[in-house]
């Protein structure tokens, strides 16, 4: 029996996400107040993943990926993405090993302003609810809190009840976690200084 992955098209997903992000900033909602409060603190957080930082030139991203590839820590992913797979733990539970596809976000000066990532379980299956994105989303949220600390995530409705995102802001850095499909969880880390400037 063949199972077809239930995915939104990439174009539809990114349009939906962009509309959501734009609408979040359009009115004086609690979310907007949250953004303004964090930005007013003047705190700058630059950490991304694999030692990369907001503000570095794009060359730093590609050089780092080349280095990680030589170390056999990442491989070529889908499209332009790089692919990282959690290492096998000979003493632990490997039933929830994850893969991450990622790529840098670059501003108009070709500097890094963020990172986009897509996570999924290696053993994902349509019939296995424990591997679906709603369960993975919880794991990713906990990982982001462990890695970055700071404020807790808040829940924001994207489209009806089916799509919910988690958002956290610490100073200039915003992290968004959103289910992309039953399989995938999309994460975006970005510098709000650039994002808000681009919208103005």
Image (cartoon, rainbow, N blue to C red):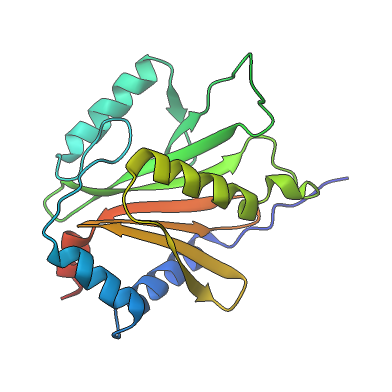
Counting labels gives 0
User: Which residue sits furthest bottom?
Assistant: 27
Q: Quadrant of the N terminus?
A: top right
Side (left or right) of 22 relative to 77: left
Residue 25 lies in quadrant: bottom left
Give the image location of residue 171, x and y in percent: 20, 57
Residue 64 lies in quadrant: top left
Q: Quadrant of the C terminus?
A: bottom left
Front position in the image: 182 or 65: 182
Front position in the image: 79 or 56: 56
Front position in the image: 52 or 140: 140
Side (left or right) of 103 relative to 112: right
Res. 80 in view: no
Give the image location of residue 34, x and y in percent: 28, 71
Side (left or right) of 167 relative to 200: right
Give the image location of residue 56, x and y in percent: 15, 39
Res. 163 in view: yes
Front position in the image: 18 or 193: 193
Q: Residue at x 46, y 41 (%)?
A: 143
Side (left or right) of 138 relative to 128: left
In the rendered view, tell whether residue 117 sits above or below residue 84: below
Give the image location of residue 197, x and y in percent: 14, 68
User: Which residue sits furthest right?
Assistant: 1
In the rendered view, tell whether residue 76 sits above or below residue 125: above
In the rendered view, tell whether residue 155 sits above or below residue 65: below
In the rendered view, tell whether residue 103 sits above or below residue 75: below
Residue 55 lies in quadrant: top left
Q: Residue at x 11, y 59 (%)?
A: 42
């Amino acid at each position: 029996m063949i199972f077809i992955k239930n995915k939104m098209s990439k174009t539809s997903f990114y349009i939906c996400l962009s509309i959501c992000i734009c609408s979040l900033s359009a009115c004086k909602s609690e979310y907007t107040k949250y953004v303004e409060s964090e930005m007013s603190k003047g705190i700058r957080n630059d950490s991304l993943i694999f030692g990369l930082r907001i503000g570095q030139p794009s060359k730093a991203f590609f050089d780092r990926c080349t280095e990680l590839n030589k170390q056999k820590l990442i491989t070529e992913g889908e499209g332009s993405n790089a692919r990282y797979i959690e290492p096998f733990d000979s003493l632990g539970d490997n039933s929830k090993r994850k893969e991450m596809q990622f790529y840098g976000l670059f501003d108009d000066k070709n500097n890094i302003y963020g990172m986009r990532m897509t996570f999924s379980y290696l053993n994902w299956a349509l019939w296995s609810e424990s591997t679906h994105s709603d369960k993975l989303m919880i794991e990713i949220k906990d990982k982001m809190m462990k890695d970055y600390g700071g404020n807790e995530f808040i829940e924001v409705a994207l489209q009806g009840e089916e799509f919910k995102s988690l958002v956290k802001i610490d100073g200039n850095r915003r992290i968004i976690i959103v289910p992309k499909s039953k399989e995938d969880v999309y994460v975006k880390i970005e510098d709000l200084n650039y994002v808000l400037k681009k919208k103005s």
